[in-house]
Amino acid sequence: MKKRKIAALVLALALLTACGGEQGGKGDPAQKDDLSYQTTGLTRDQAVVLVNGDPITAEEYLFWLSNSVMMQEYYMGLPQDEEGWAEVGAGIKADALEAAKLYRIIESKAAEYGAELTEEMETTMAAELTQAIESQGGEENFSAYLDAMCVSRKGFEEINKVYYYNQALMAKLTELGELTPTQADLDAFVEEFLEAGGYYGAKHILIATRRQLEDGSYEEYSDEEKQKAYELALNLRERLLEENDSEEVFDELMNEFSEDGRNPETGALYAPQGYTLVASGQMVPEFEEGALALKEGQVGDIVPTDYGYHIIMRIPVDDAPVRESAAEQVNESYMMNKLTQKWLDEAEVTAEPAYETIDVKDFYEKLTALNEALHPAQTPEPTESGS
């Protein structure tokens, strides 16, 4: 199953601002009014998955499954054959489970910490629901949305409460000091940032094989000029070897010979300290490959690129800029995301036999047919549930 990292806005679903009444029965599990039953043979209150022992009902899960199918259809298209459905359907089913799991965990943790909805939150939810119904042209259109998402009005409102439970939980954890970052949290942020970007440090001596013209374009050196450039690079590399690749000697030769951009007034290199925070893909591939093949303090063989001949020394990454930004970025929201991801990773998920009976293709086709019969003009768009 693909692991879905939880971003800061994962719970900001804006369900009530999506297109979208009330499915018949107001939560009555009678089969004739129960779209869960009509599409899968499972009543809406039937448990399909347990998350840390807490049930996820068919209605909850099928809401997310319908959304996942719509996301696939809207952005990638749906498969046209059984083999395609077998592969894509497994991913759709897993994505829906991850969304349902997240919501169950947040609701459970809110109860565990005593994070209750405030009167203001309740008022806001009611106002947003009214606004959503009005913006969609009334109850009939909103009802069509809920039917398309295989959820009752009651079920929809319960799912939508979790956004506010998340807010209440975050406020409670902040009050308890559990979202206050430690030095270890800051260090972990820096490490993850550098690793994710493939950052490295390098300094180099560039012997150019092209010249810049007045109009900003470049002109390649002649073969004879390129040969002289290579001989100079070779000579410098030999001098470094004689000095055991001393960084002090490297710096002396770099400042004297490198053609990697100089101040026209002073003649000094623009980057005499080297490139101390280079992201993967920032340099040309040949340079990056040559730099990453080295250990810190090691000098490599001559690396040719379109710019010329490079003699590269790998240097430590200067993480100071990242540490400076960490103080702002590692805030309560960041810490909440980390904690939520930890809860997700540690959650014990048990699929009930009913879960295994759910076939995505069959569910989608039955739900589509039912909604075309009930609301032939309605085509709701998917809701973003995570990343």
Image (spheres, rainbow, N blue to C red):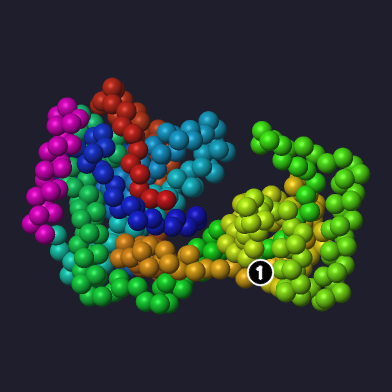
| Magenta segment boundaries in residue numbering | 118-140
Write the residue at 76% across / 45% down.
306
42 vs 313, left or right, is left
Q: In this rendering, does residue 111 appear at all?
A: no
Up-down: is 246 above or below 304? below
- Mark 1 — residue? 315
Q: In this rendering, does residue 118 appear at all?
A: yes
Badge 1 amino acid: Ile
- Residue in the foreground of this view, choosing between 338 and 68: 338
Write the residue at 78% across / 49% down.
208
- Residue in the foreground of this view, choosing between 38 and 321: 321
Write the residue at 17% across / 70% down.
114
Up-down: is 226 above or below 318? above
The number of callouts visible is: 1
Question: What kind of element bears circle 1?
Answer: strand
Write the residue at 77% across / 65% down.
253
* Magenta stretch holds residue 139: yes
**Residue 194 quadrant:** bottom right
**Residue 245 quadrant:** bottom right
Residue 350, percent across and down?
A: 39, 63
